Amino acid sequence: MFRGWQVGQEKFQNYWKALDYSIKVNQHVTFEYYNDVFCNLQGTKVKQDYDYRSEYLKKLFEKSQNLLYSGGADSHTILQLSEKLGLKWESLLMMLSAPSIEGDANCEYQAGIEYCKQKKLPLEIIDHNIKHYERIYQDEFFMYKNAGQMNFRPDYLQHSIQFNRTKNYISGHEKPFVLYHQGRWYAWMHDTMMIDYCDLTNIDFFFISPNMPEIFIQDARAMREKFLKNNQYPTTTKIINRDVPRNPFDNYRAKKHNKGYVFNHKNCDAVKEIWKMGRPDIIHNWLNITTKHIQKYGDHLNWESEGYIHQGILCWLIDIDSLESIDVAEFGSMVKNV
């Protein structure tokens, strides 16, 4: 049971350490996400009308649990399910994004905060303010001290004193990617979707847990059903939207944001606020560190358009009907014309 990167027989829970080693020994980096489970699902019966989510959440609550809660659809779905089942959390841990408590990058958390107040839930807030930004981006090797993430907002639990590595946490990771190709439907996952908490093994990724992989397969099939309900059956290879049944706040919509050069609206809001605070040095520190880092590895990997995210490495590719595991090396040829 392992989630992380591998080079030959060596295993790593930080992507950059794995890449450094791969360059040294001239071998490829691969990514594993409990491959011993997800690559061996053939023969498993997955019923679409069975409530695997409730079964698994009750199983997890045999021990004290804490929820990583943002008020987003994934974590709010888990919270509402726990309320339906009468399960009580030790805490709900929310990590804010803005360099000040009133910053625009925190706007989308307000609905979740209000919900917790109304329900008198044990919400704990991590306020990663301007001092936190300053501290993290004085360290040019900060990305080696988490699983490898380089997001502008330093929302790294690994650097937070409020995150307890001895407690059990549940996270809303992660929606499947679903692909139609030559009459078959496949689901896959890659490392950049999990690079935020991949190294924190006391966090259970609820929707993609090896202890209840039926949830992931059920979600992938639900995505297909929703797509086919609203669209014609594909005639060519197609990747469908990651639209999975979740429970967002019905009465809340995030305000509109314009995309900027860091591509994520919370990143943009944080950049604007820090600039208005008269602290462009923090922005420049992050840019200098990440630019230097990207240049260091420029000849060894490809980067996504965001610039600070490396191109994802697949851990597995699964036929969602037969549950057969397909060689991930075939993926590139499948999607070359998509």
Image (cartoon, rainbow, N blue to C red):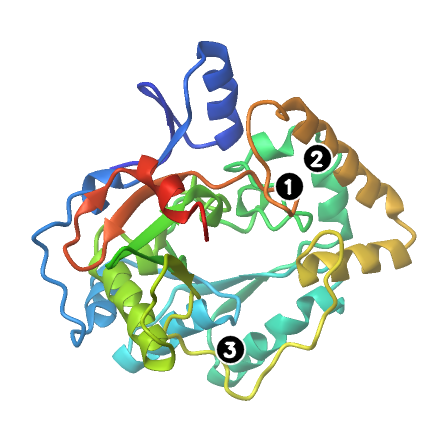
Q: Which residue sits furthest front?
A: 235
- Say whether disc 3 or disc 2 marks the residue closer to the N-terminus: 3
Q: Residue at x 25, y 68 (%)?
A: 53
Labels 1 & 2 near each other (Cβ < 8 A) = yes
The residue to which callout 2 is attached is 290
User: In this rendering, does residue 61 appear at all?
Assistant: no
Q: Secondary structure at mark 2?
A: helix
Residue 308, numbered circle: 1
**Label 2 sits on what residue type?**
Thr
Residue 160 image point, x, y percent:
58, 46
289 above or below 267? above
Q: Is residue 242 left or right of residue 117?
A: left
Quadrant of the rendered image containing residue 237: bottom left
Q: Residue at x 60, y 34 (%)?
A: 143
Instruction: Tell whether 258 sits left or right of 159.
Output: right
Residue 271 location (% of width, % of height):
79, 55
Residue identified by numbered label 3 = 116
Q: Nearer the viewer, mark 3 or mark 2?
A: 2
Q: Are marks 3 and 1 in contact (CB under 8 Å)?
A: no
> Residue 295, which numbered label?
none
**Residue nearest the observer in this picture, 247 or 190:** 190
Q: CA distance from mark 3 to mark 2?
A: 36 Å
